[in-house]
Image: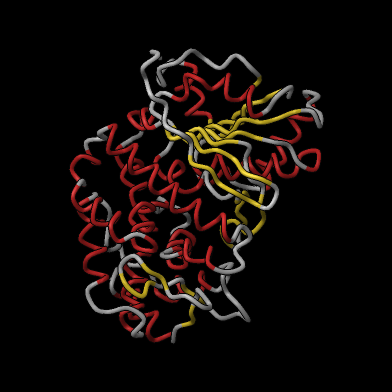
Amino acid sequence: MTATTRVPAPVVVTHALGRYPVYVEPGVLGRLEALVGEHLPGARVAMVADAAVHQLLQAGRFGRSPWEGAALTFPPGEPSKTREQWAQLTDALLEQGFGRDSGLVSLGGGVAGDLAGFVAATYMRGLPYVQVPTTLLAMLDASVGGKTGVDTPQGKNLIGAFHPPAAVLADPRVLSTLPERDFRGGMAEAVKHGLIADAGYFAWMEGNAEALLRRDEAALTRLVRRSVEIKAEVVGADEREAGRRAILNAGHTVAHALEHATGYALPHGEAVALGLVAECALAETIGAAPEGVRLRVSALLERLGLPVRLAEALDPDRVMAAMASDKKNRAARVRFALPSQLGEMHAGAWTQEAPEAAIREALGAIG
């Protein structure tokens, strides 16, 4: 780095016990060891990594030398986000003698962040950790906010903890290694951020869809940074999801149900895209949002290469049943975070019930 290179200031996320920086910076992985030393001072450090991503790191695919410290890996994908995999990782740390003076580095996508974060939250009653997200979805959404956890047969993220990281290192350059489908899947969360909080950001994505799909570095850096800023503002004001943070679940009541109903064969980003379409349709059906929101959201998702209709029909009863275990439910009633217009969500209770007939009609919009 030359003396004239300007390093952008990190986005700061506040929480009940302090704050942490999110470095959104092309090439920041070149400073991994230095930043780990800064944010985990004096700690014995182990990396907990998606095995495929760890292999890319060690092969030099991220434009830096291999990680020379201890590393534990797990098989890629949502099926690894289980209590069983958590037990294997914590047992390995115990066997290698990691104590309370240790720290972790999470490397990979959203699964890595959730799983390694849950290990950090529970091992020795809590270790500090640094997150290094390597997917677009993880950079602009999953790595911010301190949610960690694992899945169960009953649903996603039902066992977990709030455990904020010490720092997040988001390097847009590593996105060049992502398969196209995974890259496009991450765009769904950015569309969600525009929908829930910033109509101007939504319009910017509409005007820059082609540059984003080319993986233009400047466009991707702006995308990640703005999404991180939006999420940081929301979670900083409502860390434990007692109120407004629920708006971040826009699209996710349907998305999680679709994932569950397909046995997690449907990637999360694509499920979120479909969930956004269905829940915007629901908002229009029950009069929560004016007509036209769904069409504009659908149009942007399609331009970004995301599905707006299911490739294969799903039994609506299975999807409805999967919604019954959603974490936002109250008194066994399904609740949704719905927009009031583009860039704004309904205030007050932040989530709303909807008649079953309206929910089924909304599911028809993606069927």
Q: Nearer the viewer, residue 235 or 7?
A: 7
Give coordinates of residue 329: x percent, y percent.
57, 74
Give coordinates of residue 180: x percent, y percent.
29, 38
Q: Give the total number of marks visible in the rendering.
A: 0
Give coordinates of residue 206: x percent, y percent.
21, 53
Q: Nearer the viewer, residue 292 or 152?
A: 292
Give coordinates of residue 189: x percent, y percent.
39, 53
Residue appearing at x 30%, y 67% in the figure: 342
Residue appearing at x 40%, y 14% in the figure: 3
* Farthest front residue in view: 4
**The C terminus lies in which quarter of the figure?**
bottom left
Above or below — where is 186 with respect to 100?
below
Q: Nearer the viewer, residue 38 or 306?
A: 38
* Colour scheme shown: secondary structure
Above or below — where is 241 with respect to 75?
below
Residue appearing at x 40%, y 42% in the figure: 225
Above or below — where is 118 with respect to 307?
above
Residue appearing at x 24%, y 51% in the figure: 204
Q: Residue 300's image quarter?
A: bottom left
